[in-house]
Image (cartoon, grey):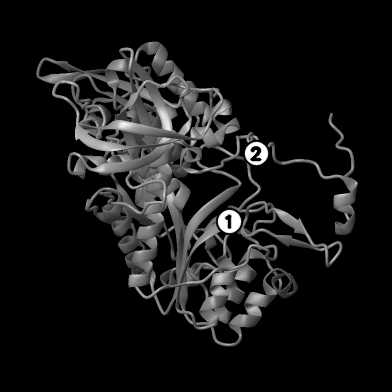
Amino acid sequence: MTFSTSPVAAGLRTAYAADLTAIPPGTSVSICGWVNRIRQHGEHLVFVDVRDHTGIVQCVLAKRDDLRPEYVVQVSGEVFPRPEGTENPQIPTGSVEIRDGIVTVLSEAEPIPFSLDDRVEVEEATRLRHRYLDLRRERMQRNLRLRAQINSAIRAAMEEQGFVEIETPLLWTPTPEGAREFYVPSRTQPGSFYSLPQSPQIAKQLLMVAGFDRYYQIARCLRDEDLRSDRQFEFTQLDVEASFVGQADVHRFISNAMARVIANVFDGRTVDIGTISWREAMGRYGSDKPDRRFGHPLVDVTGVFAKTEVRALSAPHVAALLDPEPTSLSRARLDQLVERARALGAKGLLWVKVAQDGEGYSISSPVSKLLDRSEVEQLLEQTGAGDGDVILLVADEWEKAVTTLGQIRLERGRHLADPKELDLFWVVDFPLFEGLDEAGKPISAHHPFTMPNEEDLDLLETDPLSVRSQSYDLVLNGWELGSGSIRIHRADIQRRIFSTLGIDEETANSRFGFLLEAFRYGAPPHGGFAIGIDRLAALLAGETNIREIIAYPKTQSGIDLMTQAPKQLDAATLAPLGLTVRPVQRG
């Protein structure tokens, strides 16, 4: 008799390790996997722990001297409960074993260069050099399978909402999306190049013109940018676009998909998805992707010091923060925070220590003698400071003050956040422009096809930096999962945006001609969004580096240590492409 609760490969396996606890005692099974551990038991028996991706099972065998760790084996025998007192509660399969096992060695293995035990720290370069071994570890098996769960939930959610999955090209044309692109030489068109897509942005907008009013894709994208913990050359995103929609519709589509993902990964867990404006996010947390889990928002105390005689507090904006861990702030540490604020570009930082003094409070600060009683009372009232608290103050231009103190808030308090909490929310009403270039022209905060807030259209020519966009980000636990916007589909508004940006008609046609031409044939109102699946999977897996949820990642220098890519090509390979490589001049 055989038993299995999972799909199996015909002929070799009849059950996975995790199946065995549900199998009736005495049932004959065959499992396949890797030898995890070998333990001698007397002269005639050996215990062999066999590992597959679902777990580890103990197999009781007649003594054999030819088995080694990481040998690939098939074990056939009968399932029985372990004898009382020998169970292993540390593993899910620790209550059962396979007895009278017959082992078939399917493949031998040389000694491996590092332990696969997740409790053993292994140098990252060693892990990446032997990634095929690293992926055998329980942690990596769990992470990549969780990522597959995410993709499955996304597809189900999008299809339920009427979206159709359409693949867009990987060999594409250069697009003006802000990031450096990878280029691919054409053999059939010598001297010409494709670009690898930064995103399917323009391709999906063309699909809206084509009448596919609800498109999605789990898209592979590439950007030639410096790598870091949350960025690789290659990344994957849920890419979405829909016609005849507003912001609320796009938010609903994506929120439904996220709710489905979280329920799928965490066994039915629900999460509330709120909304906060960009201005509020910046003002309260000093970030457009705030981590709100540990509280301690910034407080606007500009009014407290409107008439102050303290020169360091006389500024357009004064932001205050109750330090999350005031007892750890020695004078030396406070001096370090002052230097940190300066390193972040602010003029400096002031601190105020609060202590109970009888029925009231006293303060100590480098400027305590310059603060009048009214300023102190208002400061304590507005910040809610009490005995033992330390108030940190940064005075500067609004954005500089809040971003500086917001960064210090993160550095001081992020470790206090509950890692199991999921704080998911939308950030809306971003500025349409992020500043001015050297010629005094506005710079698009996103791309030049983002629709302005219609209430602000009259400000385009007179006060462009005050114009809000119909763009939005989705944030989870202080990480930006993705961004999107309602697109410009009206020719008159697009011309005004180009004019504001200083883009003339010739330049516009050169850079965006095929999109603008398509829009002349009837473009519906449309908007979309893209979620970074790498970041999402890392967060839900409890990882801080996206390399841990990618099968074959690159190092920070862009090298694949396993394959040693990128590699040089010889002249014979380059010749049909019309390319030669000049020696690099290294200074």
As drawn, the residue found furthest toward the left would be 359
Q: Mark 2 points at which residue?
A: 558
Residue 362: x and y in percent read 21, 18
x, y percentage for residue 43?
33, 12
In percent of the image, x 33 and y 36: which residue is there?
55
569 horizontally vs 444: left or right: right
Give how far across and how far down residue 523 sits, in percent. 53, 82
> Would you say 355 lies left or right of 489 here?
left
Q: Which amino acid does label 1 sit on?
A: Cys
**CA neighbours of label 2 inside 10 A, class few (<14), some (14 to 19), many (20+):** some
Along the viewing direction, whichever of 411 and 260 lies nearer the viewer: 260
Q: Nearer the viewer, residue 519 or 232?
A: 232
Does the image show residue 287?
A: no
Task: Please tell me how crowded label 1 is: few (under 14), some (14-19), or many (20+) other residues with Cα within 10 Å.
Answer: some
Q: In which quarter of the image is residue 586?
A: top right
Furthest-bottom residue in view? 521
Give the position of the C terminus as an image quadrant.
Answer: top right
Answer whether residue 324 is visible to the viewer in this image.
Answer: yes
* Badge 1 element: strand
Residue 71 in picture, x, y percent from top left? 48, 30
Type of amino acid under label 2: Gly
Residue at image location 34% in from the left, 47% down from the top: 14
Instruction: Name the residue beneath numbered marker 1.
Output: 221
Q: Distance between the residues labelled 1 and 2?
A: 16 Å
